[in-house]
Amino acid sequence: MKSRFTLHSLSNHNKTHTSPILSLRDENNNGSLKNTFPDKYTISSLFQWASKILQVHGIDSPSLDAEVLLSNLLSCKRIDLYIHPDQPVEETVAMRYKESIQRRSQRLPLQYITNHAEFMSLDFYVDERVLIPRPETELLVEAVIKRAQILTHEIVIVDIGVGSGNIAITLAKKIDKARIFAIDISPDALAVAKINAQRHHVLDKITFLCGNIFQPLEGFGIESKVNFIVSNPPYVSSSEFNNLQKEVRDFEPYTALISGQDGLQMFKRIIANANTWLKPGGFITFEVGEKQARKVARLFAETRCFKKADLLKDYQHISRIVIAQMEEGRG
Ligand SMILES: C[S@@+](CC[C@H](N)C(=O)[O-])C[C@H]1O[C@@H](n2cnc3c(N)ncnc32)[C@H](O)[C@@H]1O
């Protein structure tokens, strides 16, 4: 089964990208790339070396990744590389580039090397402590913002599995009246989320809590007051794990990916305990895996506490977001 958990170097590009810096004439590539690191460091010599190395290691978009890593180290735009191909590069930068390319050759995701991931046009710090935010998750955030617009008072939001903080922080920025509780079982993930909250100036709107699903909410007095429970939980089944892309399987946090034998454990546990926290008329908004949307909608229906769930499709026409509203008279 094709997993959603693939990582493209950059979501809008593909492997056919050919760099205008120079064409990849592979005159020296006779299979051995040992000792091919250039002795004169210019943008084009380093780039040519890097593209070949990444290509030989089977990276999907070698030229693009080589450009992104070089422009990141030079703190310039990719277009600037095209404009100044003969510009000399300092030795320290060249050495750091060499190391970056070696790490990428081992399939470390590009975003963990650059420590940047874009989400809803915001820049997030990421490293191996957190899942790299995916473009599909933006649909979840947009769905919540749309439904929050009609609310006039303070809007209480609980994000379960905060990771890098992409969902909680974007909601805090986009919804003025938001008061957010951001929960993760991983203290490491919370440390990254706090870096991002500080970066985006929303620390005062978010309470970060470490623990298992709703457990850390005890004592805040928000029972039956939550307007939105949002979650992009782990949803890969344990049997699917070995089929994941190497970048994902070997480098992204296991606890961010796997949820029991069927991949549905977190959805079941959140839905089963949501009654305590959700305000009547409040929403649960989930991101779900491929082929999970109907199953999750059925879990909501079985409780008889929710209206019929809405399913939203992602850019590949896969039902990706499930939104269910609690009946007004329940709770
Ligand atoms: C798929 S990642 C999502 C991260 C981020 N929200 C995003 O959209 O990119 C799931 C997150 O849930 C956290 N998690 C896993 N099990 C949990 C649990 N039982 N309670 C709270 N958080 C949990 C993981 O540590 C991970 O950070």
Image: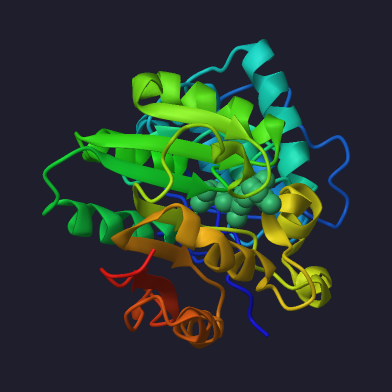
What residue is shown at x 16% (from left), y 40% (from top)? 153
**In x, y percent, where is residue 264?**
65, 73
- Number of labels in the image equals 0
Quarter of the picture holding the N terminus: bottom right
Name the foreground residue: 314 vs 74. Answer: 314
Relative to 321, say whether 163 is above or below: above
Relative to residue 297, is residue 36 depicted above or below? above
Q: Answer with the quarter of the image where residue 147 lies.
A: bottom left
Residue 129, how many percent across, how many down?
Answer: 69, 36
Q: Nearer the viewer, residue 288 or 224?
A: 224
Look at the picture and state if 79 lies above or below 269: above
Q: Is residue 285 rendered to the left or right of residue 130?
A: left
Residue 118 visible (yes or no):
no
Q: Residue at x 36, y 72 (%)?
A: 324
Q: Residue 322's image quarter?
A: bottom left
Residue at coordinates 41% horizontally, 29% vertically from top-left?
206
Q: How is the image coloured?
A: rainbow
What is the quadrant of the C terminus in the image? bottom left
In this view, the residue in front, 45 or 311, is 311
x and y percent of residue 309 in the render?
A: 36, 80
Is residue 248 visible from the viewing direction of this image? Answer: yes
Horizontal side, residue 10 vs residue 270: left or right: left
Q: Position of residue 224 (x, y in %)?
A: 38, 51
Q: Relative to 275, does residue 106 appear above or below in the rendering?
A: above
Picture residue at 29% right of the left edge, 56% below the top = 144
Q: Nearer the viewer, residue 330 or 43?
A: 330
